Image (tube, coloured by chain):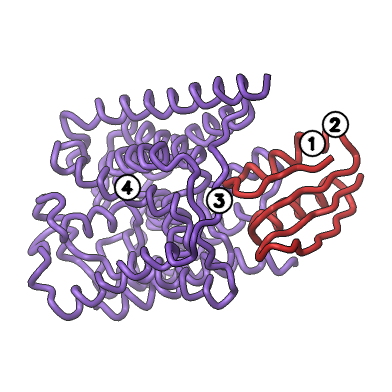
Chain colours: A red, B purple
C-alpha cells in the first residue's frame, strides 16, 4: 500500500502512516520534506517496524518503506 | 541519546538562556521572546495600529525568520510550497493572535512566564493543553487541510527579503516607524543583540523543528516525547537563569505584562492551542516555516499581523489590568470560528472519502 503524504502539514504524515499501519503490514510512505521523513521514520520505529528510507527522484522527496 | 532529541534539548536550553539575557539587556520581563507580542509591536511600528505603548519593530522577529532562512538555504531545505487552504490559515492565524493577546503571550512566552514564576501562565498552560486536546480530537475525526504543492522557488525569498527591508528601515531610517516612548514597546535590548538572539534561535529552531504545540500533541497522539523534553528543558533553564539574575518571582499577583483573570488566561490559550494544532504548528513554528519558503505559513503570519492590529484597533487585547470589555467576545467568537472550521473540514473530508 502506498501512502502519499507529500505536501501535508504536521502531523498528517505520521497520522496517515499510523492509520495505514493499523490495516497493512507493508507500506510505502511518500513525503516531500525532511521533517516528515524523520517524524514518520521515528514513529514507525517506535512501533517496532523495519524502516528503509530512499531518496525519491524529485528534490527533497523520500520514499519510506515500512514493514511490520 | 539520539541526535535529534539532543538537538531539541540544546535548542530548548539555548532559547531559555537567550530569552532571559534579552530581558537582562532591556526587553520587558518574561518577554525575551514572544511571537505574538513582537508581531503586535512590529504591526504598531508600521502604524497598522496606534496603541502607543506597544510599538517597536522587534529585531527578534527579523532574526528568527532570517536565521531560519539561512539555515534552510544552507541545508537545501529552502523550498517554496503553497496552496494548503491559505485563507483558512489566515483566519486561524488571526484568531490564534486574538487568543494570545487575551493571555498576553504566545506559547513560547507562556513557557518563559512559567520560567519566571508567573503562576497565571500555568493556568494558561492548562488551557493550552485543553485547546490541543480539541485539535487532536479534530485530527482523529479526520481534520486535514489540503496538501501544499511546490511553486516557483523565487516565491520562497519574498518573505525573508521583506525582513531585510524591515531591518534596513529599522537601522537606517527609523524615523519612518513609530516607537513607543513608554510601556512594553519602549523596552528592548540593543538592536544587534536582539537580532543576534533571533538569528541563533531561528537557525536552531529550524534544525530542531522546534514547536511548542508538537511537544504536547505528539506526546498524546503518538507517545513521541522528544519535543516535550525540549519544552521542559526550556522552562528549567529559564528558571535557573532567572534565579541567577534574581529575576525569579513566584506568584499570581504583580506579574510583568500579565493579568490574573484565570478564566480568560485559560480560554485565551485554549484558542491558541486549538488553532495551532489545526495549523500544524505554534506561532514560532509558523514563523520558522515562513522563513523556509512555506507560503501557507507566510499567510498565517500575515493573519497574525492583521489579527494583532485588529486586537488593538478594536480594544480586544487584554492588559495588565485584565481583559478588555470586548476581548472576551472576540475569544468566544474565535473558539466558535475555529470549531466551525474543524467541523466543516471534517464533514467535507468524510464526503470525499465516502
**Image check: A28 left or right of B295?**
right
Q: In the rendering, which numbered label is found on residue A20? A: 1
Instruction: Give A66 or B180, whichever is nearer the viewer.
Output: A66
Q: CA distance from mark 4 to mark 1?
A: 35 Å
Q: Chain of mark 1?
A: A
Q: Residue at 42% of width from left, 41% of height from top?
A: B89
Disc nearest the viewer among 3 and 4:
3
Q: Chain of mark 3?
A: B
Disc nearest the viewer among 2 and 3:
3
Task: Establish if A1 lies above or below B161.
Answer: above
Q: Are marks 4 and 2 on the same chain?
A: no
Q: CA distance from mark 1 to mark 3?
A: 23 Å
Q: CA distance from mark 3 to mark 4?
A: 23 Å
Whether label 3 touches label 4, CB < 8 Å: no
Q: Residue at 43% of width from left, 59% of height from top?
A: B290
Q: Are marks 1 and 3 on the same chain?
A: no
Q: CA distance from mark 2 to mark 3?
A: 28 Å
Q: Are marks 2 and 3 on the same chain?
A: no
Q: Quadrant of residue B122?
A: top left
Q: In the rendering, which numbered label is found on residue B149? A: 3
| Residue placed under numbered mark 2 in the picture | A23
Q: Quadrant of residue B46?
A: bottom left
Disc nearest the viewer among 4 and 1:
1
Few, some or many C-alpha atoms within 10 Å of disc 3 (few <14, some 14-19, many ≥20)? some
Look at the image and tell me in which quarter the N terminus of chain B lies: bottom right
Q: CA distance from mark 4 to mark 2?
A: 40 Å
Q: Quadrant of residue B20?
A: bottom left
Whether label 1 touches label 2, CB < 8 Å: yes
Q: In the rendering, which numbered label is found on residue B304? A: 4
Which secondary structure lies at badge 2?
A: helix
Few, some or many C-alpha atoms within 10 Å of disc 1 (few <14, some 14-19, many ≥20)? some
Amino acid at each position: 500500500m502506498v501512502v502519499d503524504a507529500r505536501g501535508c502539514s504536521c502531523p498528517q504524515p505520521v497520522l496517515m502512516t499510523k492509520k495505514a499501519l493499523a490495516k497493512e503490514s507493508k507500506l510505502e510512505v511518500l513525503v516531500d520534506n525532511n521533517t516528515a521523513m524523520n517524524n514518520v521514520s521515528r514513529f514507525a520505529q517506535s512501533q517496532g517496524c523495519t524502516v528503509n528510507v530512499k531518496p525519491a527522484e524529485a528534490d527533497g522527496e523520500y520514499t519510506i518503506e515500512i514493514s511490520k | 541519546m539520539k541526535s535529534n532529541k539532543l538537538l531539541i534539548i540544546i535548542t530548548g536550553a539555548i532559547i531559555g538562556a537567550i530569552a532571559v539575557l534579552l530581558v537582562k539587556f532591556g526587553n520587558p520581563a518574561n518577554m525575551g521572546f514572544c511571537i505574538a507580542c513582537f508581531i503586535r509591536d512590529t504591526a504598531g511600528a508600521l502604524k497598522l495600529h496606534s496603541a502607543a505603548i506597544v510599538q517597536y519593530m522587534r529585531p527578534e522577529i527579523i532574526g528568527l525568520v532570517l536565521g531560519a532562512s539561512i539555515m534552510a538555504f544552507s541545508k537545501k531545505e529552502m523550498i517554496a510550497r503553497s496552496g494548503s487552504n491559505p485563507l483558512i490559515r489566515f483566519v486561524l492565524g488571526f484568531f490564534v493572535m486574538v487568543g494570545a493577546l487575551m493571555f498576553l503571550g504566545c506559547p513560547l512566552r507562556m513557557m518563559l512566564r512559567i520560567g519566571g514564576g508567573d503562576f497565571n501562565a500555568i493556568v494558561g498552560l492548562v488551557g493550552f493543553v485543553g485547546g490541543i486536546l480539541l485539535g487532536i480530537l479534530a485530527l482523529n475525526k479526520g481534520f486535514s487541510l489540503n496538501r501544499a504543492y511546490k511553486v516557483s522557488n523565487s516565491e520562497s525569498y519574498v518573505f525573508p527579503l521583506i525582513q531585510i527591508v524591515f531591518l534596513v528601515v529599522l537601522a537606517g531610517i527609523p524615523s519612518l516607524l513609530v516607537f513607543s516612548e513608554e510601556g512594553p514597546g519602549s523596552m528592548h535590548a540593543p538592536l544587534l543583540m536582539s537580532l543576534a538572539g533571533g538569528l541563533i534561535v531561528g537557525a536552531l529552531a529550524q534544525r530542531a523543528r522546534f514547536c511548542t504545540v508538537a511537544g504536547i500533541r505528539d506526546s498524546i497522539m503518538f507517545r513521541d516525547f522528544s519535543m516535550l523534553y525540549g519544552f521542559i528543558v526550556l522552562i528549567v533553564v529559564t528558571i535557573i537563569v532567572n534565579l541567577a539574575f534574581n529575576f525569579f518571582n513566584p506568584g499570581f499577583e504583580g506579574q510583568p505584562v500579565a493579568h490574573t483573570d484565570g478564566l480568560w488566561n485559560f480560554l485565551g490559550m485554549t484558542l491558541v492551542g486549538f488553532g495551532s494544532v489545526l495549523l500544524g504548528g505554534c506561532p514560532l513554528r509558523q514563523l520558522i516555516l515562513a522563513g523556509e519558503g512555506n507560503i501557507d505559513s507566510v499567510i498565517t503570519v500575515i493573519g497574525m499581523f492583521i489579527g494583532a492590529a485588529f486586537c488593538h484597533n478594536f480594544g480586544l487585547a487584554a492588559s495588565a489590568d485584565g481583559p478588555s470589555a470586548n476581548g472576551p467576545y472576540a475569544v468566544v467568537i474565535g473558539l466558535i470560528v475555529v470549531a466551525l472550521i474543524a467541523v466543516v473540514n471534517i464533514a467535507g473530508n468524510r464526503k470525499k472519502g465516502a
